[in-house]
Amino acid sequence: MLGTVLLVILVLLLVGAFPSWPHAASWGYGPTGGIGLLLLIVILLVLFGRL
């Protein structure tokens, strides 16, 4: 249950930080890469049953 909630929250953050949105245009790819890395870690933890 917790893994699913974290996964949904991270996907929403990843979409919100995408550089094509007007509010995130000056941020570059840093936030998207960081949130993408967190998303990858959570997906791996869910797949391996650690979360």
Image (spheres, helix red, strand yellow):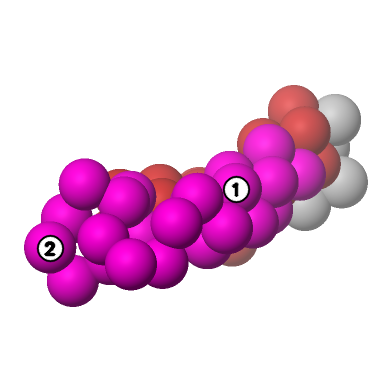
Tag 2: amino acid: Pro
Residue 13 location in percent, x, y? 39, 61
Q: Is residue 19 visible?
A: yes
Q: Residues within 10 Å of mark 2 (few under 14, many from 20)?
A: few
**Magenta span of residues:** 17-41
Q: Residue at x 26, y 61 (%)?
A: 25
| Image quarter of residue 24 | bottom left
> Could you tell me if residue 39 is visible in this image?
no
Q: List the single residue furthest toward the front.
A: 26
Q: Which residue is mark 2?
A: 22
- Which tag is nearer the camera, tag 2 or tag 1? 2
Magenta stretch encompasses residue 33: yes
Q: How many marks?
A: 2
Name the image quarter holding residue 2. bottom right
Which residue is tagged 1? 33
Is residue 9 shown left or right of residue 50? left
Find residue 27 and report its horizontal and vertical position in percent: 41, 67
